[in-house]
Image: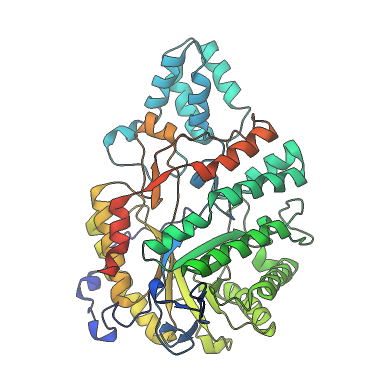
Amino acid sequence: MKRVFFVLLVFLPFIFFCSERESEFSDAGTDIIQAADVISDDTGNQPLFSRLSASGKRIVDSNGNPVRLRGFNIGGYLFLETWVNQIDHTTSSRAYKFAQSHIYKDEIVAALKESIPEAKKGDPLPNVCIGNGSGWLDKFTTELKKLIPETDADAFVNELKKYPTICDDSDYKLRGLLAQRFGIAARDELLLSFIRSWITEEDIKWISAQGFNLIRVPIGYRTLTTDEDAELPEKLTYNEPVLKAIDELLNWCEKYGVYAVIDLQESPGGHNDYSDFKGKLYENEKMQALTVELWKYISNRYKNRDIVAMYSLLAEPFDAPSTDARDVVYDKIVKGIRENGDDHLLVIHDGFKGMGSFPEPSKYNWTNVVYSTHIFEFDATSLSAYQTLISLYDQIYSDAQKRYNVPFFIGSFSVIKDIDWAYEALSELVKWYEKRQYHWSVWTYKRIDSPEAKILFNHSSMWGVRSVLKSEFERPDIYLDSKDEIKRKFEKYREVVLEPNQRMLDILKSFQK
């Protein structure tokens, strides 16, 4: 999930006259195969899954029965966004940690609380890394110098500056720091220990038990390789232990009746700016060739796995300079997969250029495709704002889907804030998806809200369906912990108890009623 948002500066008058067009779609539910409807083999053990395909606006099984896909993104897992799993510190959480043994502990904590005055207003902050980076540090320094001698304040802040934050929506900084400290082989060993701990069989079992039948699995291409990380990689050397972990994940999905979407969050050369450099995929033919190679490799491994519902080819390709540049790259990937004899559904994301920006599938002879977008409205600050947005989007999406005649997938969405109106907005979104029979996966399944941010800024969020921390959490310190200590803390993630945000979960499950 990239922190991308769009603000409607003017609400066009026509949106209030949008027709509901209920007759285009039947009410969701009665003719749709659910997770519990999967068929068991003769032994009653492992469910048998049908290869999914597109039939007009619907996704269907091999018998032509419509299948609705609803579930969760598995964030922070194979694309280790540190703001999701709280690996290492934000600048403010490190300051809080250092304060605990400092002579000016009380003053430092007081300055931390004053560094974000808007946190006192009661409207939860949308930021994913609260109190972070050089801009925040300047504010904190100003407050600290009001409370302690200037030389002592400067000494404390200069100590913080030795540890540049790696809190991010990318794992590039994390991977780089691990490789710098311990080497590439140790980097991969440590990250694998985390991967095997963040998501386990119990998670897939829980998702199925709640009545959901889909996980979307964001993957960074770097996670699939054992190479030295580079902005423009020369080659791809595949990481077999990680691929075996994905195999195991798919086995759990088969066991519990949960389809999986394999999603490429970051491609060679980059199709977005997740790793803090502009995506160069669209201008670099070598990076395009590596991306096609990567998808062929994934296809060779999983083209016979029916539990894989879809391949999501490029998540949020918003660095594309134009829709044509976006679609040319998509076409190369689609053709590479199809030439590989793989007929999986392929997810094409709009890159936030609009659901009306896609090509007609016939333009490129695309078949079995699903068109997708993500919905994150950071500047929507009321229920009425969401209702207005939904009214506008409903007409645009409906008109576009009529034209393309393909299924639509809201691959990632959140209303972000842990506040009453946001829960009502979430309910409105789910009702809209269900009315239009869009497939959907919420962002994200698990997220640890920063304990320090709760103490300092009273911060909580609606980012994670399971986010209520009910156990001890030992935050890995990638700068200061030893390799063995980092590995121990990574392995302890499987013991972290994150209970569901029940209000959020109930809304997401409302389609079952």
Residue 351: tell me if it is visible: no
At a point 65% along the width and 79% down the height, the residue shown is 337
| Towards the viewer: 102 or 213 | 213
Please report the residue visible at 32 percent of the width from the left and 59 percent of the height from the top: 9
Left or right of residue 52: residue 237:
right
- Which residue ends up furthest to the left in the rendered image? 17
The location of residue 215, given as percent across then percent down, is: 48, 64
Quadrant of the rendered image containing residue 71 = bottom left
Q: Position of residue 102 (x, y in %)?
A: 51, 14
**x, y percent for residue 350:** 49, 71
Q: Position of residue 437 (x, y in %)?
A: 34, 77
Quadrant for the C terminus in the image: bottom left
Q: Is residue 21 left or right of residue 145?
A: left
Instruction: Look at the picture and state if 14 lies above or below 497.
Output: below
321 in relation to 494, above or below: below
Q: Is residue 432 visible to us here?
A: yes
In the rendered view, tell whether residue 380 sits above or below residue 64: above
Q: Residue at x 60, y 27 (%)?
A: 161
